[in-house]
Image: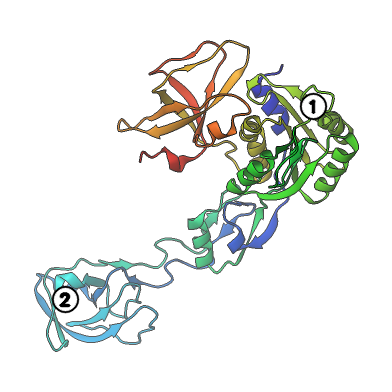
C-alpha cells in the first residue's frame, strides 16, 4: 500500500491549469482569472448623493435650523445644469449627481419641507461632504481590480460589468467525462435480470462535478473488456479535459482499467492500493497522446464519492487554475464515539456536523461505514479523517472536510 498523501502527490504533481480562454462575463462565475484586469474609469464616475435629501452648501447650515430656498429636484440619471448658490438647496434622490455649487447632502429625515415645497428647514448643521459619494471612492482609473488566480464570484463579476467589460480571459472550467465500467450495470428503469444492478456511480459523479462548478459529460456505461474501455477512453479524451471512470481498478479478473491506463499513459500511469478506507483501489494516468488525466475510482458507490473528494476534485480545481484545491477542512468536536480497528489505513467517515452554541462544529452522528451503503451516507455533510489506531472518543477533536457548508447551521 502507499500512503494517502503519496497518492495525492502523484496525481497533482504535474498537472497545470488549462490554457486561458476568453469567455463571456455571464459564463464566468466560479472561473479563475488568467490576466490582470484594470479599471477603465473611476467609480463612482461622478459625485452623487448616498441619500434621499437636499443638496446644499454646508456653510449655509452653520448653527443649524436654517431655511433654504428649494430650486429644483434631481433624480438618478439626470444631468443637472443648475447651480446651487448661497441660501439654496435642491431636492436630490439617492444616486443622483450632485449639482454644481453643492458640496453636501442633508438626509430627508433631518429636514422640514414647507407645504408649498418652495422652502426647506435644515434642522441641524451639516458637515462638509456629508452623504456625498466622491469620484473614485471605490475604484480609480488604472487600479488593479482582478489579478491572475482570482476566482470570479458575484461581486467581482459585478465590478467588471460596472466597468463595461463583457468578456474576461480565464482558465476554463474543466470539461469532465464520466463513465462506469461493469457488465452488471444498467441505467434502465425497468425490472432487472438477476445479478444486474442499476448504476449509481455515474449519476452521483455527474452531480458532484456540476455542484463543484465543472462541466460534466456523460460517457455512459461500458462493458468489462479492454478493447471497449480503451475505445471509450480514447473517445472521451478527444473532447474532454479529464476522464473519471468507476470500477475495474481492483484485483479481479475483469479489472481492465488498470491495464488500459498503462497502455494509454505509459510512465505517467500508476495503479495503486492506497492506505485509505473506503477507496483503497485507485488508478491514475495522464495520456501520452493529448495530456488528459484519467482517474480510475473504485466501483463501490461510497468509495467513488470519497475518491472524488480525495483525488478528482482537487486535481480538477488545479486544471481550473484555483489556488485552493480542497474543501474547507476544520477541527470538529465529537458528540458521539468514532471507533475503528487498527489496519494501517486512514479511515474517512461520513458524518453529520453542525455548528453549536459554543461556536464549534460538532459531529452529531456518524453514518454506517461500508463502501456499498450509499443511502447511509446520503445526508452526511462532512468527511472526518480518522488516523490508524483505535478511533476517537466523545469530546475529542477530529479533522473534518466540510462537504456542504450550508448544512452546518442548526435547524
Position of residue 275 measured from the top left corner of the image (x, y, whole percent): 66, 18
What residue is shown with label 2?
A: 60
Q: Residue at x 42, y 68 (%)?
A: 44
- Kindly state the secondary structure of the residue where label 1 is placed: strand
- Mark 1 surroundings: few (<14), some (14-19) or many (≥20) residues within 10 A: many
State the mark number for residue 100: none
Nearer to us in this view, 252 or 409: 252
Alpha carbons under labels 1 and 2: distance apart: 79 Å
**Left or right: 139, with 313 as reference point:** left
What residue is shown with label 1?
A: 270
Q: Residue at x 12, y 86 (%)?
A: 115
Residue 275 seen anywhere in this rendered image of the structure: yes
**Which of labels 1 and 2 is toward the front?**
1
- Kindly state the secondary structure of the residue where label 2 is placed: helix
Position of residue 303 measured from the top left corner of the image (x, y, whole percent): 65, 29
Dot 1 or dot 2: first in sequence order is 2
Nearer to us in this view, 202 or 37: 202
Amino acid at each position: 500500500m502507499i500512503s494517502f498523501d503519496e497518492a495525492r502527490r502523484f496525481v497533482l504533481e504535474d498537472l497545470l491549469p488549462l490554457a486561458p480562454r476568453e469567455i463571456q462575463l455571464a459564463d464566468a462565475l466560479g472561473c479563475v482569472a488568467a490576466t490582470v484586469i484594470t479599471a477603465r474609469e473611476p467609480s463612482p464616475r461622478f459625485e452623487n448623493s448616498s441619500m434621499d435629501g437636499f443638496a446644499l452648501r454646508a456653510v449655509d447650515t452653520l448653527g443649524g435650523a436654517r431655511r433654504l430656498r428649494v430650486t429644483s429636484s434631481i433624480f438618478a440619471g439626470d444631468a443637472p445644469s443648475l447651480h446651487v448658490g448661497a441660501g439654496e438647496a435642491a431636492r436630490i434622490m439617492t444616486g443622483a449627481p450632485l449639482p454644481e455649487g453643492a458640496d453636501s447632502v442633508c438626509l430627508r429625515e433631518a429636514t422640514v419641507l414647507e407645504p408649498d415645497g418652495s422652502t426647506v428647514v435644515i434642522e441641524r448643521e451639516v458637515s462638509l461632504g456629508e452623504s456625498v459619494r466622491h469620484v473614485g471612492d471605490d475604484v480609480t482609473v488604472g487600479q488593479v481590480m482582478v489579478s491572475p488566480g482570482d476566482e470570479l464570484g458575484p461581486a467581482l463579476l459585478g465590478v467588471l460589468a460596472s466597468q463595461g467589460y463583457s468578456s474576461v480571459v480565464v482558465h476554463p472550467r474543466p470539461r469532465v467525462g464520466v463513465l462506469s465500467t461493469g457488465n452488471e450495470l444498467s441505467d434502465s428503469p425497468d425490472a432487472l435480470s438477476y445479478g444486474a444492478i442499476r448504476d449509481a456511480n455515474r449519476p452521483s459523479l455527474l452531480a458532484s462535478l456540476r455542484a463543484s462548478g465543472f462541466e460534466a459529460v456523460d460517457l455512459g456505461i461500458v462493458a468489462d473488456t479492454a478493447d471497449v474501455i480503451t475505445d471509450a477512453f480514447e473517445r472521451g479524451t478527444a473532447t474532454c479535459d479529464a476522464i473519471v471512470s468507476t470500477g475495474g481498478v481492483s484485483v479481479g479478473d475483469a479489472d481492465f482499467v488498470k491495464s488500459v491506463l498503462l497502455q494509454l499513459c505509459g510512465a505517467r500511469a500508476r495503479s495503486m492500493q492506497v492506505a485509505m478506507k473506503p477507496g483503497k483501489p485507485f488508478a491514475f494516468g495522464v495520456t501520452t497522446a493529448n495530456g488528459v488525466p484519467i482517474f480510475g475510482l473504485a466501483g463501490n458507490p461510497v468509495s467513488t464519492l470519497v475518491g472524488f473528494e480525495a483525488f478528482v476534485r482537487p486535481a480538477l480545481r488545479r486544471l481550473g487554475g484555483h489556488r485552493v484545491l480542497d474543501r474547507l477542512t476544520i477541527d470538529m468536536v465529537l458528540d458521539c464515539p468514532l471507533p475503528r480497528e487498527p489496519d494501517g489505513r486512514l479511515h474517512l467517515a461520513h458524518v453529520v456536523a453542525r455548528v453549536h452554541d459554543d461556536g464549534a462544529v460538532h459531529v452529531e452522528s456518524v453514518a454506517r461505514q461500508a463502501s456499498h451503503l450509499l443511502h447511509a451516507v446520503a445526508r452526511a455533510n462532512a468527511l472526518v479523517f480518522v488516523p490508524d489506531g483505535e478511533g476517537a472518543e466523545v469530546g475529542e477533536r477530529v479533522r473534518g472536510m466540510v462537504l456542504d457548508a450550508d448544512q452546518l447551521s442548526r435547524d
